[in-house]
Image: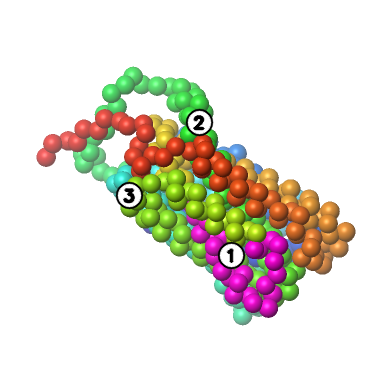
Amino acid sequence: MIAAFFFLYEFFLRTFVGSVAHQIIPQLHLTVETFALVGSAYYIAYGVMQIPVGLLVDKFGVKRVMLFATLMCVLATFLFSHATNFTTAFLSRFLMGFGSSFAFVCLLVIAVTWFPKKYFGIFAGISQFIGTMGPLLAGGPLISLMLDLHDTWRTALMDIGFFGVILALLVLLFVKNKPRDGERVLIFLKQPETLKVRLMRLMRNKQAWSVAFYSGTLYVSIALLGAIWGTDYLQARGLSQSIAADTISFVWLGYALGCPLLGVLSDLSKRRKPVLLACSVLGLIASIGITYFSFTHVVWVYFVLFFMLGVAAAGQSVAFAAMSEHVDHSTRATGFGLNNGLITLFTATVPLLVSYFINRDSHHHANHLVAHDFIRGFTCMPILFCCSFVIALIFIRETYCKSQKEIIQLARPF
């Protein structure tokens, strides 16, 4: 539960910038492109750290790694709340991404360590459901609270920093690396391997790369809309900031509900590929509706489309389950890091490309963007969902919810 709340905390930090973009851009003297760089700084650090995170968790255990990561997030949050220029904002967002990079891998390692492996998809989905409350809170609820209390984004972020201090204390007091010794013994009937050998084996695993690229192409659209450009785009379509932020919350609501539901569906059906394919199709439909059609006078349609987009992106939780089944026990945490790293690579680079097209099409009226300015950049979303469909259809093998790298497990007799 504490790991899930850490994931919630880092997810809030990941997405709050998009909700208050209108306040941050003028106060920090940013342009469209420098704002995109500030947003991407988080993902750059997050992505670069994913393979090292898996190695560090394997070496030092979850407890010490989580405590360090939580304190790093707290430091970065306080720093960003006092930022006055691009340099400080970029540095603090980079540190946020560095600290946050540990959250999801730690969560998955705890899930696979403490719960039966046959229910990993369900537990991973439930954990992500809790974690995704972060971006839900960073959308409409954050804006409404700021308006009601007449608070600035700086004050709100200071409060979030103090929440992080409490979270760090909980990690210190209650998180354990593994269940008590004696409940179960795992015996690996093979010669010990060096870290380099295990890492190279993972790098040569084509299925691991296929799953990771699927996750990246599937997930990036909700990062683009939910964390960076969604609120501004909907305001350009004619929605108020409050309604636009509420609409963005629906993408995270769809993601939050989709993660456990898709995990249950996949585990009960004993299939991964049909769920992965369905998510790609659902995302394609939603992204086309959001990009090319206007529903300003029927706002509920936007609610439905953004909810669909969130459910589609939740397919990456099933992809994490597939990843755990396509790699062996000794490289599982690093495999999770590879999957998360590819997701982050896409979420760091695609928004920069989209922002380039937005800036180019806005004809230097960045302070008053119109809907047309977003169309060409947002066209990447349907293209990426098509790519994820092809990857799932052709390159990912069905696991039938069973490990493809079996180990021999001997239970201690009672």
Q: Nearer the viewer, mark 3 or mark 1?
A: 1
Looking at the rendered structure, the number of numbered marks drawn on it comes to: 3
Which stretch is magenta? 289-317
- The one nearer the camera, 400 or 341, is 400
Q: Is residue 221 left or right of residue 272?
A: right
Q: Which mark is residue 121?
A: none
Where residue 173 appears, x then y in whole percent? 37, 53
Q: Quadrant of the N terminus?
A: bottom left
Q: Which residue is mark 2?
A: 206
- The one nearer the camera, 104 or 2, is 104
Decide: is 38 above or below 412. below
Q: How is the image coloured?
A: rainbow
Q: Is residue 364 left or right of residue 193?
A: right
Mark 3 and mark 1 lie on one chain; the one further toward the N terminus is 3
Q: Is residue 372 visible?
A: yes
Decide: is 306 above or below 336. below
Kindly state the secondary structure of the residue where label 3 is placed. Answer: helix
Q: Which residue is mark 3?
A: 119
Q: Quadrant of the C terminus?
A: top left
Residue situated furthest right in the rendering: 363
Q: Which residue is mark 1?
A: 306
Q: Residues within 10 Å of mark 2 (few under 14, many from 20)?
A: few
Decide: is 278 above or below 182. below
Contact between marks 3 and 1 (CB within 8 A): the answer is: no
**CA separation, marks 3 and 1?**
28 Å
Where residue 83 appears, x then y in whole percent? 71, 58
Under mark 1, the amino acid is Phe
Under mark 2, the amino acid is Lys
Q: Nearer the viewer, mark 2 or mark 3?
A: 2
Under mark 3, the amino acid is Tyr
